Image: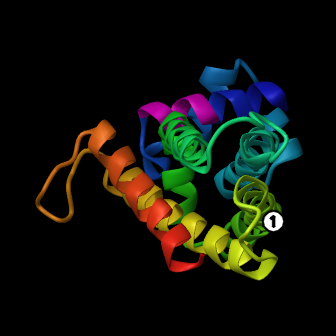
Amino acid sequence: MLRILDAFEKLLRRSAYESITINDIVAESSTGAGSIYARFDGKRSILLAVHARVRSRARRYFLALFDPENHRDESVEAAIERIVTGMFAWHKRHRAVIKTSLLLDDPDIYQGISASFRPWNAQLAALLKARNPSMSESRAAIAAAAILQITTAVLQQRVIFGAVAPTGQELTEDELIAAMMAASLGQLDRYP
């Protein structure tokens, strides 16, 4: 099963979901078609399993990234920079699976993504509160939700459009990270 999931994830990095066939997965995984159909109903069920596996990796990665106990001496600005840069790196590394998952318009995938963000939102709120003790818990929760919604929207747009700038103005990765940081830090001023 792991060979099938690894092969499908690898194929997604090279080809569009629609063009991948079960025969491609057979060849890439060195597994028979019967073995694939014994475990999965088809490509969609393989994608759901790959997406669940990536979500599990994301859960561990982001919980560590947002953990208020990590880097206790860093400023709120440094924490935001670390988080935005880490989120950008994650989305860049997993672009193929994320893009395919988003474009399938699958409610199961969307529910999984939404459920994944809840603990990260709570951790980010705790991190903001720890770095800024005068901020109320409710303000920290609102600021954390706004930061995650802003960064997620930007990153999903980048995942879907790739190098194509939908606004007509292409930003380098550094410029995009700086813009996300500025928007995120602006939320702290908006919700003091």
Membership of 43 in magenta stretch: no
Q: What residue is at 78 percent from the left and 43 percent from the top?
A: 53
User: At which x and y percent is residue 22?
Assistant: 62, 40
Identify the image quadrant of residue 109. Answer: bottom right
| In the image, farthest residue toward the left | 168
Residue 25 in sight from this viewpoint: no
**Dominant secondary structure of the residues highlighted in magenta in the image:** helix
User: At which x and y percent is residue 5?
Assistant: 73, 35
Q: Which residue in the structure is indicated by mark 1?
A: 122
Left/right placement of residue 21 relative to residue 127 reads left
> Could you say whether the residue bearing mark 1 is in a helix, strand or loop?
helix
Quarter of the image containing the N terminus? top right
**Crowd around label 1: few <14 · some 14–19 · many ≥20 (10 Å):** some
User: At which x and y percent is residue 153?
Assistant: 46, 66
Left/right placement of residue 43 relative to residue 67 reads left
Which stretch is magenta?
A: 9-14
**Residue 49 or 123: which is nearer the viewer?**
123
User: At which x and y percent is residue 13?
Assistant: 48, 33
Membership of 11 in magenta stretch: yes
Amino acid on which the number 1 mark rests in the picture = Ala
Does 167 appear above or below 178? Answer: below
Q: What residue is at 24 percent from the left and 40 percent from the top?
A: 172
Q: How many marks?
A: 1
Identify the image quadrant of residue 74. Answer: top right
Q: What residue is at 58 percent from the left and 39 percent from the top?
A: 82
Does 140 appear above or below 78? Answer: below
Identify the image quadrant of residue 110. Answer: bottom right
Does 136 appear above or below 6? Answer: below
